[in-house]
Image (cartoon, rainbow, N blue to C red):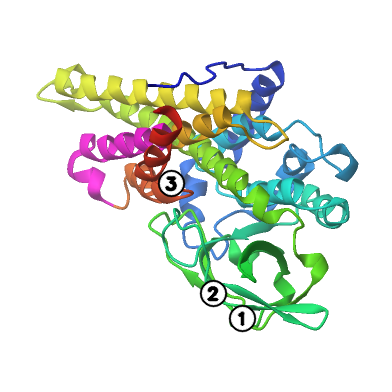
Amino acid sequence: MTRTANLSIEFSEEQAMILDSANAFCRDNSDNSAVRALLKSDTGFNPEVWSQMVALGWTGLALPEEHGGSEMGIGATIPLVESMGRHILSTPFISSTITAQAIIRGGNAIQQAKWLPGMAEGSIGTMALLDNEDWGATGTRCTLTAKGDSFELRGKKLLVNDAAVADFFLVLAKYEGDLKLVVVEAAQLASDAISNKTLVDETKRAANVDFSGVTVSAEALLTKGAEALPDVRLIGALLIAAEATGCAAAALDTVVDYLTTRKQFGRLIGSYQSLKHPTVEMLIQMDSARTFIYHAATLIGDGQLDKDTEIACRMAKVQAAEALSFAGDRSVQFHGGMGFTYDCDAMLYIRRAQWSQHQYGDPQHHRKILAALLLD
């Protein structure tokens, strides 16, 4: 027996305004020349652009008003992240937004008051979840040991996004058999704790981080961190899906521009059906991904995510990841031999596709869970 999920979708006036504003901002601050100029930089983003985003209030978009935010909800960030993906504007925004949601959903009032106001003003947080490269893992080898009134962390985390620029980390650890989310400030780490890694997508930054020997107080353990963790993972999947959807649209734009300007044998190559049909398929897949991300944005709220919202987030991640993979692959293919070179912009999209595919679970991971949710 199949289960019919909630199919509602809305695109609010506020989301439309955010999308228009974000598109203009990202277009002005992140053309392909600017993107390429940052590929070999230490941080992977322009701090001046980040400061402008903070000044525009984007870092506080989903935060409560009492902590300096706009309290518009996580759904309001979807058009912003989609625009960032469309112009390949890489900043710590996604990492910080996921971390802020973990604190909102898993922290108590004191913990929220301590960390959220700084995040509204541009403080960068990131999640340290992985002990291995399996997003489907349900446990962790990172441990907490009681030391009097404090706790000592022991273990490493892999591929922590934006680790080198983070002001603090939310670390997944185990204490007496229970999972915990622990706040660790960057200043608490040893000088050699962060080991930067080169990613397939050179617009992104991640590092392995050794938290061994870090001592934290009881106040650093989010009171409901374990309960919030499933929702935090779904929010992460949705934000990555929104970024991938925007990037798929950019890849499509690049393909259309090339097909309508490149001539071969005296004809525009876009006139050949062998190229027309895959291009239409790119459009259909990208539009489907947009439908899924805004459907999830419609359902997602500030409380615990229900089954319909879980289904929507997982479906959005599956569709967006596959749409970008197809668009990136065809972008390289259609550009011919040039498409395989580093100088062709198609490489930006296929590399982003490879990175996005596995963040917060690949399509196979989410389909496996969706089967149980949708099929009785």
**Amino acid type, callout 3:** Ser
Query: How many numbered discs?
Result: 3
* Mark 3 crowdedness (10 Å alpha carbons): few <14, some 14-19, many ≥20: many
Tell whether position 335 is magenta: yes
Which structural element holds mark 2? strand
Residue 186: image x %, image y %?
70, 71
Mark 1 or mark 2: which comes first in sequence? 2
User: As displayed, is residue 194 above or below residue 272?
Assistant: below
**Amino acid type, callout 2:** Lys
Residue 297: image x %, image y %?
60, 28
* Mark 1 crowdedness (10 Å alpha carbons): few <14, some 14-19, many ≥20: some
User: As displayed, is residue 212 above or below residue 70?
Assistant: below
Q: Which residues are magenta?
A: 318-341
Residues at badges 3 and 2 in contact (C-beta under 8 Å)? no
Residue placed under numbered mark 1 in the picture: 212
User: As displayed, is residue 365 above or below residue 266?
Assistant: below
Viewer-closest of 160 and 220: 220
Which structural element holds mark 3? helix
Magenta stretch: dominant secondary structure: helix
Residue placed under numbered mark 2 in the picture: 156
Viewer-closest of 274 and 363: 363
Residue placed under numbered mark 3 in the picture: 356
Residues at badges 1 and 2 in contact (C-beta under 8 Å)? yes
Residue 211: image x %, image y %?
62, 76
Q: CA distance from mark 3 to mark 1?
A: 29 Å
Occupied quadrant, residue 331: top left
Which structural element holds mark 1? loop
Viewer-closest of 21 and 116: 116
Q: Kindly report which numbered mark, 3 or 1, lies closer to the viewer in this rendering.
A: 1
